[in-house]
Amino acid sequence: MSLAGKFFNEREDQSAVKAVIVSKYLFAWAKIIVPWAQRNGNPVAYLDLYAGPGRYKDGSASTPLMIIEKAIADPSLRKSLLTLFNDEDPEHTDSLAKEFAKIPDIGALTYQPKITTGDVGGSIATWLQTARMVPTFSFIDPFGYIGLSLGLIKGAIKDWGCDCVFFFNYNRINAGISNEAVDKHMTALFGEVRTSLLRDQLAGLTPVQREALILENIAGAIKGLGGKFVLPFRFRNASGTRSTHYLIFVSKHERGYEVMKEIMAKESSTNDQGVPSLEYSPADARTPLLFSLQRSLDGLAAELLHKYQGQTIRMEDVYRRHHVDTRFIKKNYKDALLSLETENKITAKPAKRRPGTFGDDVTASFPGL
């Protein structure tokens, strides 16, 4: 049985979390993009390059069916959403077509789902890198790493309004970096120079250090393509002892990054003082009270005191200048500033406002040295 076949035997809770993150972002993204597209007479698109058969063996719907069913229920998307589903396995695409045909009112969609059977690392990648795209959200979910490349990601985000999220199989990539037999796949993913340097830098590192360096390098490689905002969401094994894979979001616009961070925050298995872990761990989900080993919000407050000493700055500007490449969401900044004000470590204007609030336009004055 193929890896893809094994994957679709049953829907694990991690697969469900992944599907929720992707579908929630698609519809949040569409609410922002569709009005612009409609004014210009254009559709918006959802592209799934490894779509699968549509259902898991236990009968539960996979992401493609969730997307289409929600699009039918949304009056705006019924008219505007163009969808393309690809898989390399013809049995999967045949099954997916049959599942779509069973959906009530699928004929209400202006653009019926298009299904292709193609090699993502070959013709599909070439098309994606050369075609002029309407605003498109792409989901790239290979069952390993073969076919995943910087060229593919660049193609997915190159045009206006285009974002993507891809599956990063940390377990297999961590092993593959040191394996010369799969050098071409690692080079496709990290770039030739970065791959060579990464091999040297990983020698002698602890598992935690290896993981941090590998994530830093994939983010750096993507930012080099123009993907200014990169946001990883980690999945751990059943016992919560190690990372298995990541869902990595890429956008050229901060608004998309903010929206996805809020979605990932809600799907995190744990949070500490309201700061999301941006990860899903089955073990943490079962025992959330055991998670709070550090006080993340206190750390943010202390960092803001140091970073903005001697400055007077609006809450919104504090957030904008600091939140990228952190786990913190907007509410965390308001809570941190409110805590600092309560402890008389900063002063805020206006001082009189609704209790427990720290609005976007409230200014915080930080003490100097």
Image: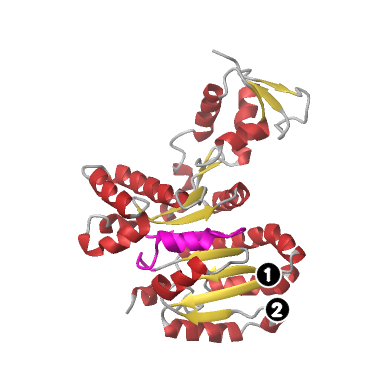
Q: For the residues labelled 1 and 2, say whether their Cβ atoms are less than 8 Å apart.
A: yes
Instruction: State the image coordinates of residue 20 (x, y, percent, origin top left).
Output: 56, 62
Task: Give neighbour class at mark 2: few <14, some 14-19, many 20+ (Cα, 10 Å).
Answer: some
Quarter of the image where the N terminus is located: bottom left
Q: Is 258 situated above or below 124? A: above
Q: Earlier in the sequence, mark 1 or mark 2?
A: 1
- Residue at image coords 43%, 36%: 293
Residue 96 visible (yes or no)? yes
- Is 277 or 361 nearer to us in this picture? 361
Q: Is residue 92 above or below residue 209?
A: below
Q: Does the magenta stretch include residue 164?
A: yes
Residue tagged by mark 2? Answer: 110
Q: Residue 43 carries which label?
A: 1
Q: Residue furthest top?
A: 369
Closer to the camera, 369 or 193? 193
Tag 1: amino acid: Pro
